[in-house]
Amino acid sequence: MTGPRLTLLDPPKGAEENCYIDTALGVQSLLRAVAAAGSRSAAYFDNGKSFIHTTLLAVEGTPERLVFEKGPDAALNAALVKSPRVTFVTSDQGVPVQFNCAAPSLTLHAGSEAFHAAMPGRLLRLQRRGYYRLAGEPTHWMLKAELFPGNDEANAMKAWVFDLSCGGLAAGVLAAEPLLKSNTSHGCMLELPAQGRIQAQVIVRIASGTVLPHGLEGRRYGLEFVNLGEKNAANVQRYILEQQRKRERTV
């Protein structure tokens, strides 16, 4: 089977923090979620001129490797193994995901022949931020949020929420608090009015200085949710839509 040449999607300008995932923890978590959901995928090879339809089956082994289904065409499967690089296109909760892997090999998975490949070092998850995104004014006064550096709840940091989407949030903390380094993972608690409390893992994507309410000096972090889950994502989406409707009624 042949298809059009595949070109990698470019993230929207200014959205770098919410499009690329380049930590091992983030990549593994997202691909495990894709495999658990059984999302259909396409594996392109031969410089994007050929592809097979497939499904990601699992992330397993030590070190971790990606396992995916063989296609129905034996000739294409044979050609895929000989290709130096494969580009996968799939989705996570309806959001396009794309990444590259080195040439796969044959393996056995759950008693059936399948492919396995080394885990990608980076993937693109193209957020549809314009659909489910709520910018602060300059902060969401109704939201209560805390960050737990290194997942240590004893050292909780109060956070002001500047921006919220199903992919992550922009949060401000006092400048006196410990610095959260780029690409590190931390715990996060977000309390949504009428929706309840969300406990999640976040990865720091970007950091900068900012001014918090009442003129306090602070730091602003761009934080990406890691494997938020369908229920939590639905609650975030519901809250955002409700707030957007309220704003529209007051315009």
Image (cartoon, rainbow, N blue to C red):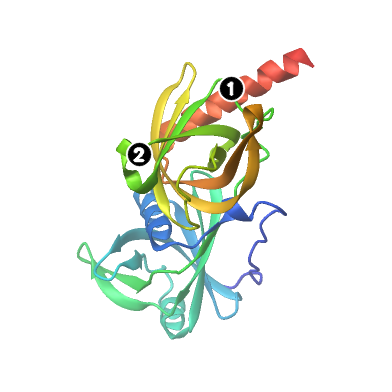
Q: From this view, report whether residue 70 is shown above or below residue 235.
A: below
Q: Quadrant of the N terminus?
A: bottom right
Q: Position of residue 251 (x, y in %)?
A: 80, 17
Q: From this view, report whether residue 205 is shown above or below residue 193.
A: below
* Residue located at (52% from left, 46% from top): 223
* Residue located at (32% from left, 61% from top): 59
The amino acid beneath tag 1 is Trp
Indicate which disc, 2 or 1, sits on the residue closer to the N terminus.
Answer: 1
Q: How many marks?
A: 2
Left or right: 175 as drawn, with respect to 244: left
Q: From this view, report whether residue 209 is shown above or below residue 191.
A: below
* Residue located at (38% from left, 58% from top): 25
The amino acid beneath tag 2 is Asn
Instruction: Pick out the residue farthest to the top.
Output: 250
**What numbered label is drawn on residue 67?**
none
How dense is the environment of label 1, judged by Cα within 10 Å: few (below 14), some, or many (20 and up)?
few
Q: Position of residue 166 (x, y in %)?
A: 54, 38
Q: Which mark's residue is nearer the viewer, 2 or 1?
A: 2
Left or right: 154 as drawn, with respect to 86: left
Between 32 and 141, the residue placed more toward the observer is: 141
Q: Position of residue 155 (x, y in %)?
A: 35, 39
Circle 2 SS class:
helix
Which residue does the numbered mark 1 point to in the structure image? 141
- Classify residue 239 by image quadrant: top right
Left or right: 230 as drawn, with respect to 45: left
Q: From this view, report whether residue 133 is shown above or below residue 124.
A: above
Between 60 and 215, the residue placed more toward the observer is: 215
- Classify residue 13 by image quadrant: bottom right
Between 71 and 171, the residue placed more toward the observer is: 171
**What numbered label is drawn on residue 155?**
2
Circle 1 SS class:
loop
